[in-house]
Amino acid sequence: MDIVSISEGFLSAQLLPAIIFMISAIMAFSTGSSWGTFAICMPIALPLAFNFTGGEVTTLVYACFAAVAGGGVFGDHCSPLSDTTILASTGAAADHIDHVKTQLPYALICGGVALIGYLILGFIGA
């Protein structure tokens, strides 16, 4: 059994992009790597989206692709482990945790707006 067949019973196509966004964001925040998140989540998210569309390329497939990319970049940007966050705080000669705390409110607003957009897109595109 794989993740696609296991999740058929309890996932809905309408919530799929938002769920993928949240999982990708959590994974990227935890690892500090957007590219690592892409490599792990794309092979899971796209077959899952194709499963819901019957193999056709629809808005749902594009939304799930974008959700992995958006969640990965959002989580990476918020993560104190991210190389770009460390480089930015070091380059500005700022305390690293202070830098993370000051960029987090702006990133969370953007992430919240993106999550609402993925919810809307899921209900429109599914």
Image (tube, rainbow, N blue to C red):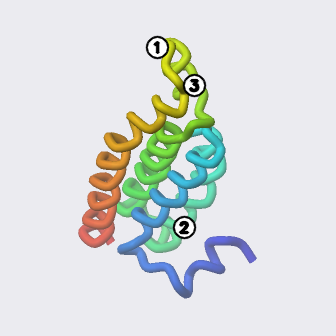
Which residue sits at x=59%, y=33%?
Answer: 82
Which residue sits at x=55%, y=87%?
Answer: 9
Q: Quadrant where the C terminus lies?
A: bottom left
Answer with mark 3 or mark 1, whichever residue precedes in sequence.
Answer: 3
Q: Position of residue 83 (x, y in %)?
A: 60, 27
**Disc 3 secondary structure class:** helix
Which of the two discs, 1 and 2, sits closer to the camera? 1
Tell me, yes or no, whether the two marked residues, 3 and 2, touch with CB atoms within 8 Å: no
Relative placement, left or right, of 120 versus 90 is left
Answer with mark 1 or mark 2, whichever residue precedes in sequence.
Answer: 2
Q: Position of residue 15 (x, y in %)?
A: 39, 72
C-alpha separation, residue under disc 3 versus residue under disc 1: 10 Å
Pointer 2 local density, CA inside 10 Å: few below 14, some 14–19, many at least 20: many
Relative placement, left or right, of 2 versus 91 is right
Q: Position of residue 109 (x, y in %)?
A: 30, 48
Which of the two discs, 3 and 2, sits closer to the camera? 3
Say which amino acid is labelled 2. Answer: Leu
Say which amino acid is labelled 1. Answer: Ala
C-alpha separation, residue under disc 3 versus residue under disc 2: 34 Å
**Disc 2 secondary structure class:** helix
Q: Quadrant where the N terminus lies?
A: bottom right
Q: Which residue is mark 3?
A: 86
Q: Position of residue 57 (x, y in %)?
A: 41, 59
Answer with mark 3 or mark 2, whichever residue precedes in sequence.
Answer: 2
Q: Which residue is mark 2?
A: 48
Which residue sits at x=39%, y=34%?
Answer: 102
Relative placement, left or right, of 49 versus 86 is left
Q: Which residue is mark 1?
A: 92
Pointer 1 local density, CA inside 10 Å: few below 14, some 14–19, many at least 20: few
